[in-house]
Image (cartoon, rainbow, N blue to C red):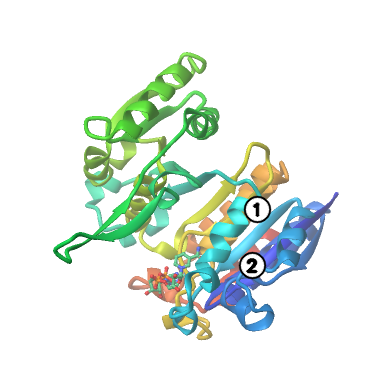
């Protein structure tokens, strides 16, 4: 089969890690007899430099013409002082909205081989865990009305507004319920205080009647933050709003040992999606062949499974990543005693080689 994949390397370590994901996909193509055609496009700081905008129209067109999008990371100190509409992150919000992506899936999986990199005690994290966090991506307080005011006494104040429609809650809720079939789904909110959370909970409760196979529960966000470190194995799938998901998924990321391990998928109502690591462009290590490419490679595995329907191929990539760890290969961020330190491209080679064996 032939598949079109849009690749947006972006800034910082983005080009280094996307090169490794492409390497691994090529190995998958060779092994399983698929042809992956890669169409490259610019976004973020490099697009500002080349095209004068963080998200050129051509990039949106390349993505729309593809079966799925791989994105490295955008941003860096060089572009930090630009006005809002030229900031690299504006490209990120723009592409999500141009492609109609509203559900962000962030699996937080602790590989057994990396247990030593997990900050939790072995009796809590032993044997690993596998949590899928589904974060609403295009609504809530990050997109609500905001502003600043100064009163008659010259006192400055600022406000941000959280607004969710039942429609926005329902569509992300359905995505989460579908993922949680025959598993546990925990909906996280702050319904004891926030009106948006009360509507969130009402909608989730209506939905749960339609999904009897899902073992559903509600949890307040402060408790969820605590439960994630107390007993992460109690969770299979978590669904939550944009801001709560932003915070909880970084907490879950740390539990897996390194931010360099975690992939993500942003989906709309169908199978098309944009796949990216949850970390940023890591300017502090860019260009040094030190970045961990695992999150990017695992993002490519999610693309294979969700957008291309190639579950066996996705599992082969995930297995190849585990195998590289089992052989003791580590990048600097997850290095531990007795292991073999590899650079970004050598780790990519090791994972690609595992696919071919
Ligand atoms: P970051 O995730 O880039 O880096 C945080 C720390 O984690 C750094 O010490 C970095 O070296 C390390 N790190 C990140 N990815 C790694 C990897 N694959 N392997 C090894 N170590 C890794 O976050 P930041 O420093 O807050 O942000 C840097 C830039 O990235 C900023 O411009 C920010 O706006 C941008 N950013 C972009 C995205 C995105 O493109 N989706 C997300 C977050 C931040």
Q: Which residue is mark 1?
A: 98
Using the rendered view, name the quadrant where residue 236 is placed.
top left
Residue on which disc 2 sits: 55
Q: Secondary structure at mark 1?
A: helix
| Residues tagged 1 and 2 counted as in contact (Cβ below 8 A) | yes
Q: Is residue 239 above or below residue 142?
A: above
User: How many other residues sit within 10 Å of disc 2, few (<14), some (14-19) or many (≥20)?
Assistant: many
Q: Which mark sits nearer the N-terminus, 1 or 2?
A: 2
Q: Is residue 180 found left or right of 44 in the rendered image? A: left
Relative to 151, 137 lies left or right? right
Q: Is residue 320 visible?
A: no
Mark 1 CB near ligand 1 (8 Å cut): no
Task: Give 197 or 272, whichever is nearer the viewer.
Answer: 197
> Is residue 220 or residue 169 the one in the foreground?
169
Question: Which residue shows up at 38% across the image and 50% down it?
Answer: 249
- Closer to the camera, 175 or 78? 78
Whether residue 150 appears in this view of the structure is yes
At 54% from the left edge and 33% from the top edge, which residue is drawn? Answer: 175
Q: Position of residue 114 (x, y in %)?
A: 39, 59
Q: Residue at x 42, y 24 (%)?
A: 204
286 lies left or right of 112: right
Residue visible at 36% across and 43% down in the picture: 162
Q: Quadrant of ligand 1?
A: bottom left
- Find residue 271 and report its image quarter: top right
Instruction: Give me the C-alpha separation between circle 1 and circle 2.
Output: 10 Å
- Relative depth, front residue between 103 and 263: 103
Above or below 308: residue 114 = below
Is residue 53 depicted above or below 257 in this figure? below
């Amino acid at each position: 089969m032939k598949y079109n994949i849009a690749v947006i390397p972006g800034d910082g370590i983005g080009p280094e890690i996307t090169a490794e994901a492409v390497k691994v996909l090529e190995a998958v193509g060779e092994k399983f007899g698929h042809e992956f055609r890669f169409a490259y496009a610019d976004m973020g700081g490099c697009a500002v430099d080349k095209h004068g905008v963080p998200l050129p129209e051509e990039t949106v067109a390349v993505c729309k013409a593809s079966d799925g999008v791989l994105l490295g990371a955008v941003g860096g100190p060089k572009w930090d002082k630009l006005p809002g509409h030229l900031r690299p992150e504006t490209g990120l919000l723009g592409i999500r909205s141009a492609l109609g992506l509203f559900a962000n899936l962030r699996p937080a999986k602790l590989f057994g081989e990396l247990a030593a990199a997990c900050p939790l005690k072995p009796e809590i994290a032993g044997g690993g865990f596998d949590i899928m966090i589904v974060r609403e991506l295009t609504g809530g307080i990050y997109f609500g009305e905001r502003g600043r005011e100064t009163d008659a006494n010259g006192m400055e104040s600022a406000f941000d507004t959280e607004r969710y429609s039942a429609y926005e809650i329902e569509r992300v809720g359905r995505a989460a319920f579908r993922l949680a079939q025959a598993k546990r789904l925990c909906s996280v909110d702050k319904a004891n205080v926030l009106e948006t959370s009360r509507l969130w909970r009402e909608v989730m409760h209506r939905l749960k009647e339609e999904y009897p196979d899902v073992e559903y529960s509600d949890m307040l966000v402060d408790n969820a933050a605590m439960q994630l470190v107390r007993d992460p194995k109690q969770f299979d799938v978590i669904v939550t709003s944009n801001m709560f998901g932003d915070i909880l998924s970084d907490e879950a990321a740390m539990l897996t040992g390194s931010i360099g391990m975690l992939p993500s998928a942003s989906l709309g109502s169908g199978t098309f999606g944009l796949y990216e690591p949850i970390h940023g462009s890591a300017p502090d290590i860019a260009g040094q062949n030190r970045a961990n490419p695992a999150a990017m490679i695992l993002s490519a595995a999610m693309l294979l499974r969700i957008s291309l329907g190639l579950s066996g191929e996705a599992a082969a990539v995930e297995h190849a990543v585990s195998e590289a760890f089992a052989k003791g290969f580590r990048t600097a961020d997850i290095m531990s005693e007795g292991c073999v330190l590899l650079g970004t491209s050598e780790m990519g080679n090791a994972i690609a080689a595992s696919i071919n064996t």
